[in-house]
Amino acid sequence: MIPVKDVMTRDVITFSAGTPVGEIANTLTRHHITGAPVVSAEGHVIGIVSEVDVFTKKGATAAEIMSPHVISVSEETGIEEAAKILASERIRRVPVVSNGKMVGLLSRSDVLDFFAHSQWTCQVCGHEEHGLENPGQCSRCQSSDFRLMRAAPGS
């Protein structure tokens, strides 16, 4: 199992509850992101604000337009489980929390990047397979000896 902590983004753009909506719009645009967590002064995730919230909801601050229902995962959650949550809940990102505080963010693009740049290589015959989890058994030689190989992004 590959834990989310090995894939998540650690340097996360966040907003406070009092962040003005105009500032949220400018930040999302400037960083080419579609949303970000809203966090308390103590680092607890209290909501998520997205570009859709900015242009469809009425309010002056993050607290007034954010979605307060937050689905989060722990650092030890497997990437496959987190990917299933993202897909089944139809969400773009999940905060990663430890001891109740946000320590990172896992987005669908983080999962896709991991998938695109990782492959499981059979150590017996060299057969390669893409996947979020160890394939278990090689479809060519039936070995269960796989190693995760990750290429640098952009290669």
Image (cartoon, grey):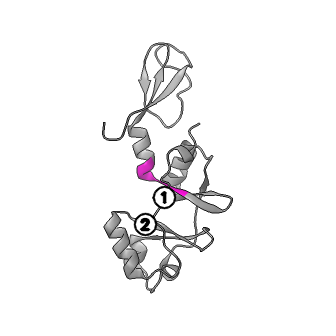
Q: Nearer the viewer, residue 37 or 67?
A: 37
Q: How many tags in the picture? A: 2
Q: Amino acid at mark 2?
A: Gly
At horizontal 44% and vertical 41% (from top left) the residue drawn is 114
Task: Tell me the quarter of the picture where residue 47 sits.
Answer: bottom right
Eyeballing the image, is 3 above or below 69?
above
State the image coordinates of residue 140 (x, y, percent, origin top left). 46, 15
Relative placement, left or right, of 33 versus 104 is left
Circles 2 and 1 in contact, beta carbons < 8 Å: yes
In magenta stretch: residue 124? no
Q: Earlier in the sequence, mark 2 or mark 1?
A: 2
Q: Give the secondary structure at mark 2.
A: strand
In magenta stretch: residue 105: yes
Q: Which mark is residue 70?
A: none
Residue 48 visible to the viewer: yes
Dot label at residue 93: 1
Residue at 47 percent across and 61 percent down: it is 12
Reply above or below: 129 against 33: above
Please provide percent x and percent y for residue 94.
53, 58
Residue 63: give x, y in percent of width and height. 53, 80
Q: Residue furthest right?
A: 99
Position of 130 relative to 27 (above/below): above
Q: CA distance from mark 2 to mark 1?
A: 8 Å
**Mark 2 burial class by Cα count in 10 Å: few <14, some 14-19, many 20+:** many
Give the residues drawn in magenta, as a range.
104-110
Q: Is residue 42 left or right of residue 23?
A: right
Kind of residue at badge 1: Arg
Residue at image position (54%, 15%) is: 143
Residues packed near mark 1 inside 10 Å, few (<14), some (14 to 19) or many (20 plus)? many
